[in-house]
Image (cartoon, grey):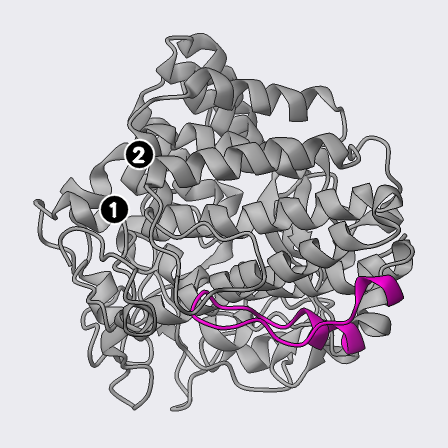
Amino acid sequence: MKLRPILYTAALGAVMLGSCTKLNENTYASLPPSSFYNNETEALSSVANLYSAMGNVANVSAPWTISEIGSDEFVVPGRASGGWYDQNNIDIMLHKPTTTNTQIANAWTNIFSAIGSANYILENLNNSAAAASLKPEIAEAKALRAYFYFYALDFWGNVPIVTTSRLDQGNLPTNAARADVFKFVESEMLAAADGLPSASTVTAAYYPRMTKEAAYMVLATMYLNAQVYTGTQRWSDASAMCDKIISSGAYALEANVVDNFKVANKGKTKETIFAVSMDPTKNAGGNPFIIYAQPFADQQKYNLPFAPANGFSTFQVALDRYENQDNRKKLLEYGPQFYKDGVTPLLDSKGQQLNLINIVSYTAAADNEAYRVLKYVPDGATFSGISANNDLVVTRYADVLLTKAEAQFRLGNVAAALTLVNQVRARSNASALAALTLQNIEDERGREFIWEGHRRRDQIRFGDYFTGTWTFKTSTNDPLTLGVYPIPAVEQATNPNLKQNPGY
């Protein structure tokens, strides 16, 4: 059964019944399970709410922003012409966030509100008289809750584990150790995977819901980062999860990486493992990447119904990773700009050809400073206001190949790893590597997944998040505590049982 039609109709009413339950709040009124959740349609009308919550996680607001700000591929400069200056962004970029950072606080709110909704929905599904027939929907909701907890594990490490919709205000939860949060997410995701269908058995109408393979990819990512999260490496387990996805036969690389982000391929790409469907024309979410990321002049280039806001940007270190013939480099806008014919100059507000240069100032950048990333191409997109209907890609098959490559390399199987990396490079016309290092693998992930929410996590795993330098990050001795963000002060104020992460 398709999820989106349900989201357009019944879920819009039921969504409020699955109201977000933050960890410092009491639960809200509930609809008795005896009078609802009696069949798949009714169950999915609430599960749809969790996919909407996933959209908040994967979209351009926090927490997506805090997965990119502070990495070596993302900057949000204040503009000399006005706008965009935000000390919260700058502090994260300089690796100096504090407990009052609003970006981090917003990320916490979005993630734990989603967890609260999942707790509420799971509690009602499990208490339904029809629970025995709703096992697939229960598995789906459990997988999504585990996914939300994975983000909490990654960003803050030591977070509360709460699985009920009601909280005793006299006994509010405290933090669980990061290793225990890891075990919880692992256990929940493995259990959910058993009840989810394989992508090899479902029809196109099932898109974009969770499958076994989507659950396996979360696990593969967790295992790849297990040494960071728990102190114990799990390279073999990461590789094994990738093998499960590969052996399903359900996925392959698209001919061109940009095909994954085109509206024309919604639900059709053979590479996307998990995505969040967007359709602002039907009040079902929207993709605002274009408004946030592109220069003003792109309104003329792509015949947009608005002028982009000239905000999210990248810089030289990210551009320099690509060979000139690498097709992925075409997703970056830099240097003299042209219309899509590649010949006609694209003019700025002064009537001169727009020339995007490397960023010089992050507090008062000129409008043409900093390069841009055109991740979600506007060609063929339908806009409602500033939002397009490009689906948000969360995980895709290229990540399976590069995750397995890294795991195999770390296990000593360099030849197998090299083959996998070159498979991804060949798709984009990058030259084949004759040998392989860990640095090659990290760089390849940077090229392939720019602005897909992986970079901070990757840099922490490889270590250069702390020891590396790049545009505006000049320190090479960041404290290791910056591998996690601070618990927001506002959350500690409402729940004194929350213990702050070390160093903040």
Point out residue 55 in the picture as x, y percentages from the top left corner.
60, 63
- Image quadrant occupied by the C terminus: bottom left
Q: Residue furthest front?
A: 170
Q: Are marks 1 and 2 in contact (CB under 8 Å)?
A: yes
**Earlier-in-chain disc, 1 versus 2:** 2
- Say which residue label 1 marks: 483
The answer to whether one can see residue 232 in this image is: yes
The residue shown at (42%, 69%) is: 169
Point out residue 105 in the picture as x, y percentages from the top left corner.
35, 70
Within-10-Å neighbours for mark 1: few <14, some 14–19, many 20+: many
| Amino acid type, mark 2 | Val
Q: Secondary structure at mark 1?
A: helix
Tell me the quarter of the picture where residue 100 sits: bottom left
User: Looking at this view, is 403 or 166 the one in front?
Assistant: 166
User: Looking at this view, is 172 or 307 the one in front?
Assistant: 172
Point out residue 166 in the picture as x, y percentages from the top left corner.
56, 64
User: Looking at this view, is 281 or 330 the one in front?
Assistant: 281
- Magenta residue check for 36: no
Per the model, the C-alpha gap separating discs 1 and 2 is: 9 Å
Q: Which residues are magenta?
A: 12-35
Within-10-Å neighbours for mark 2: few <14, some 14–19, many 20+: many
The residue shown at (34%, 42%) is: 321
Q: Secondary structure at mark 2?
A: helix
- Say which residue label 2 marks: 228
Mark sitting on residue 229: none
The answer to whether one can see residue 323 in this image is: no
| Amino acid type, mark 1 | Gly
- Magenta residue check for 26: yes
